[in-house]
Amino acid sequence: MVTPELRQQEQDEMLVPNLEGIQGPPPMEDSALAFETTPASTSRFTWTIENFSKICNRKLYSDVFVVGGCKWRVIIFPTGNHVAYLSMYLDVADANLLPHGWNKYAQFSLAVINQLDNNYSLRKEATYHFSIQGRDRGFTSFMPLEDLYDLNKGYVVNDQCIIEAEVVVRRVVDYSNYDSKKETGYVGLKNQGATCYLNSLLQTLYHIPYFRRAVYHMPTMENDTPSGSIILALQSLFYKLQHGDNSVSTKALTKSFGWDSADSFLQHDVQELNRVLCEKLEDKMKGTAVEGTIENLFEGHHMNYIECINVEYKSSRKESFYDLALDVKGCSDVYASFDKYVEVERLEGDNIYQSDKHGLQDAKKGVLFIDFPPVLQLQLKRFEYDFKRAKMVKINDRYEFPLHLDLDKDNGKYLSPEADRRVCNFYTLHSILVHSGGGHGGHYYAFVQPGLKDIWYKFDDERVTKEDMKQALEEQYGGEEELPHTNSGLNTTPLRFTKHSNAYMLVYIRESDKEQILCDLDEKDILEHLKIRFRKENEEEYKKRSKQWPTYSDFAEQIGKHIYFDLVDFDKIQSFWASKHVTLNQVKVEFSKEFGIPVQSQRFWWWAERVNKTCRLVCPLTLQEEASTVGQLADKLNKSPNSVLNLFLEVELGQENQPIALPLKTKDDILIFFKLYDPEKEELRYVGRLFVKASGKPADIVHKLNEIAGFEQDEDIELYEEIKFNPSVTCELIDINHSFRSNQLEDGDIICYQKRCSPEKLDQYQHADVPSFFEYIHNKQG
């Protein structure tokens, strides 16, 4: 129970204007933490606030509720936390009473319920590592106050406001020592920013050996380059997946598609991408030894027919398909979708059929299948356009799909009279592409059963894990699950929680063809000239890029041109080779000789991937680490001594841009990077970095930021923290009058800033602020 004294003490404190992200243990350890897919504890809390407009308190606390053995509560600022928005946070209620080192990982959502139309309820989600130091997390700018208090909009009805919190406290798996290849025998694919949909599709195709062998046998020219040839790029990617020890980049392949860097941040439709890729491969296979592979694997045929009821007349048309789009809405499972697919439509009344020979006639119209392909690809129609809300929405209804699919059932009711009944259309599920998220964005990953050997693997970008069948199948049906309600005695009605992760594409393999399709592949299946080429490229790549040291010039060259989020694309930086036996201090000496940078002007930093998939600097290397060999540093990161080691080289410049000795970094000093946004030109560029005091305020450096940008000293600017971009963009306004520490900024964080737009200019710009520009770049499609 929270005592009045404790509550008063907390009311006197300044709440952190919380932002999505990760905080807690040192980031190097954090970088490889991941949630188990099965929640340890899940619950929903409902808070009904009476006399809402009469609340005088600056902030308000809900009752305490328990999830995962932890006490939680919701905190709101009814008139905003120094902003014209409702501010709302999830808080650890008894943090002051918990033991040192206590922490919990939780995924949560906070919502304001629309009491006129629940479809318009506003909900925001976040994931956070709660600790005694980081006890609360949420949204400073949850919703505009003018919308909240507008009585016509339904958020406050009869002076009553309803708040909901859904909390999932998950167990955490530490992947800091995890090696996908060692644990599963497979490696993952790197995410370029929003290319998880591509990675999932490629892993599915890769695990069809017949398809992979055909790709290996497609002819390429000696002067072809992967970035200029889809075939060579796909061959190279498959070779690395088959022989590599680390996750593989898809950048050469996307370049061969003709995508520029901005395209990599646009989520394309999986179904369309699959069709385009197969069409291109089919075209390239013509006249080669593997001509017809795509058709042989994926092509089926159905018959569209119209049959008159009162006269003897029937017309039909045979059509081919490479995949089938099945309805989810209104269908309980795959069989119900097939029933709907072949459902007979009556053409009568206003919809009567105009026949060529018999004029207007009552008729029936339908589709029946002539044959199914050996590899059956089923696209589930999880997305539809909602005209009322004028946006795409996702259908999360429960939809079951079997491990074994019998399309000959009920005496072949899906088959046309022309179908060859000697063919047994009995299929086994091979892979499942999953979409997690909503109608305008989300994350894709795949479950694959290689070889149909009852062993399932989850391919989630770089990470590959072994999963059980229940997780791969039943957990991807979607629908709702029942949650315990924490408001005991107030409402005994079971609460239902919608699952936003569910199957989007299914791949089945026909049992009678599986030996041919899932054939064994060995070295002889890869053409000799490809093996020689790829081995040589790997050796050259290792020498060229075995050790990488990004500097500020790399940031300036890339940001706003090749990338927008994060700081650097490691595939596009100046690289240096270093033997695994030399120490980093020896590397410094070589740098001093080659570039004229004194040893005392060089400081190396660690990079780490955070849980939200962003890459940030975390801390400088210690003196002991700089005395270590490059191979020992790779070992520390659980990498092979021959693998790529990414470090950041900090160089301090004085007058006339000459290197000077580096200042001592204290615990209160944090290194922040800055990007400048121009809404008029819609341009984002890197403008530098500053060491700031964690105890200081952003307001203290406004004059410096104006000077860097070339603004007037008294220019009014807005600062935003760039937090994450996948599966959705999070870029939050920073309160410049709170300390950097209160804003939860730390080493390696990125601040984007701009001139504050006057109201009259807001309508002049298409993307008037940093968040809207990032949303434009991200431009996620469901």
Image (spheres, helix red, strand yellow):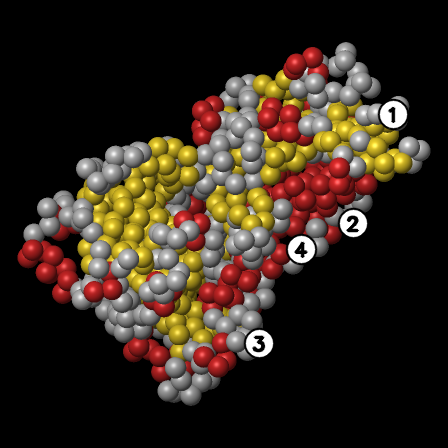
Amino acid under disc 1: Val
Give the residue number, with chain letter if any, for mark 4.
259
Give the residue number, with chain letter if any, for mark 3.
681
Q: CA distance from mark 2 to mark 4?
A: 21 Å
Marks 3 and 2, the one that precedes in the sequence: 2
The residue at the far front in this view is 349
Amino acid under disc 3: Lys
Vertical placement of 361 versus 730: above or below? above
Where residue 107 appears, as percent x and y from the top left, is 34, 45
Q: Considering depth in this image, is 356 or 237 the residue closer to the camera?
A: 356
Amino acid under disc 2: Asn
**Is residue 579 something that shows in the picture?**
no
| Residue that appears at 42% across and 76% down | 653
| Residue that appears at 52% across and 54% down | 389
The mark closer to the camera, 3 or 2, is 3
Secondary element under disc 3, as helix, strand or loop, is loop
Q: Is residue 263 left or right of residue 213?
A: left
Quadrant of residue 636 in the image?
top left
The mark closer to the camera, 2 or 4, is 4
Where residue 421 appears, as percent x and y from the top left, is 77, 13
Secondary element under disc 2, as helix, strand or loop, is loop
Q: CA distance from mark 3 to mark 2?
A: 40 Å
Give the residue number, with chain letter if any, for mark 2.
223
Give the residue number, with chain letter if any, for mark 1.
311
The mark closer to the camera, 4 or 1, is 1
